[in-house]
Amino acid sequence: MRFFLLLILSAFSMSAAAEVKEYTLTLRNHKFVPATLTIPANTKVKLLVVNEDATPEEFESHELNREKIVTGKGRITVYVGPLKPGKYPFFGEFHMDTAQGVLIAK
Amino acid sequence: MNNKNIARLPLSLLALSIGLLASSAALAGPADKVYSPVVEKGETEFELRSGYRDFNNSDDEYASVFAIGYGVTNNWMTELVVEYEGETGQGGKMEAVEWENIVVLTEQGKHWVDVGLLLEYEHTFADGPDELKVGPMFMKDFSRTIANLNLILERKIGSGASSDIDVGYNWQVKWRGNEALEWGLQGFGGAGALDDLFEGDDHSAGPALFGVKRLASGDKIGYDAALLAGLNADAPDLTFRVSLEYEMY
């Protein structure tokens, strides 16, 4: 049991010290702006997803193992990485025909 | 409440929950699952899980559970579960109703490991005490691999309850590839009573399949299935478990 408590404490303390760079993705007319976002590889980053539309959207990426609802006119934060260099597609699940984007880690 | 106190809150909740279990039987059931500390506000889940355990020296066991869950906040999902169990030769029956809660303690990806808490109360329809289960759950991404670990402490409550706390665990490793069909490993087991760990313990592990199918409506159907081999004498020889989940927002 002590091991798990220590594990949890370590998880909190390790991340508290790190400074995470923030990037913004805007949902406008059910499209991501920018649709292509370049981030540093092997570095954790924070995505601020701002929904300017009145309807909710779900930020989702199988490659990033993330799915999170952003309400209409709402905003969410999504932590991703550290990612190996490459392309990581993401989409808005409620408007998949238009809400498409890709993170490029390099 | 200032920021420092807010940061301490998840740890306090965890410590309090573990402390509540001051005193504990085989934990793993045929229809168990591996929990993840991820919850989406406003999402409704319908889940059907079934399993069959083949024992060499006793009757085989089977169980099915049906659950309806709702993401109340981005940190709390609550679920109502009904459980049907049986043994070969004796028939099955409605065994219990459970109130299951997942509390997310860390924002996904923010820390080195994602942490959540399982809180479950089970009322049995059979004669005997009810059960309280509490335990932390962990999730960690390693590139395209996702590892989950659940630690579960169980204490009987009510008339005839023993003072033991049983310790169980579930784990899985999943390799992300084609989301419709992915593969990995799962393991389930019990480590015995907290005061007498690894007495009467049982451990099972084996290959697992996972997948998600997206519907045009935005809803999702997810599944996972595993074939588990018993790793010691007290474990069932073979367990087959399958889970089907429908998610809608």
Image (cartoon, rainbow, N blue to C red):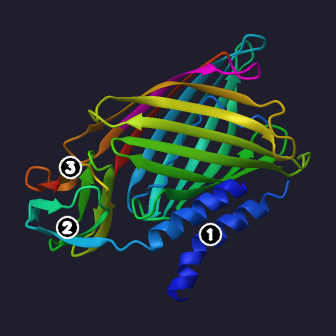
* Residue denoted by label 1: B11
Q: Disc 1 and disc 3: Cα gap in Å?
A: 35 Å
Against A97, is B180 above or below?
Answer: above
Q: Quadrant of residue B187 in the image? A: top right
Discs 1/3, front = 3
For the record, the magenta segment spans B222-236
- Measured as percent of width and height from the top left, residue B144 is found at 33, 41
Chain letter for mark 1, please: B
Q: Nearer the viewer, residue B118 or B216?
A: B118
Q: Residues within 10 Å of mark 3 (few under 14, many from 20)?
A: few
Q: Could you tell me which secondary element the residue under label 1 belongs to?
A: helix
Give a yes or no on whether discs 3 and 2 share a subunit: yes
Discs 3/2, front = 3
Chain letter for mark 3, please: A
Chain letter for mark 2, please: A
Residues at discs 1 and 3 in contact (Cβ within 8 Å) = no
**Amino acid at the residue labelled 3:** Pro
Q: Could you tell me which secondary element the residue under label 3 belongs to?
A: loop
**Amino acid at the residue labelled 2:** Thr
Q: Could you tell me which secondary element the residue under label 2 belongs to?
A: loop
Residue visible at 87% across and 46% down in the picture: B195
Q: Nearer the viewer, residue B9 or B95?
A: B9
Give a yes or no on whether discs 1 and 3 share a subunit: no
Q: Nearer the viewer, residue B193 or A9?
A: A9
- Residue A16 belongs to magenta span: no
Q: Residues within 10 Å of mark 2 (few under 14, many from 20)?
A: some
- Measured as percent of width and height from the top left, residue B44 is found at 41, 53
* Residue denoted by label 2: A55
Q: Is residue B28 visible?
A: no
* Residue denoted by label 3: A85
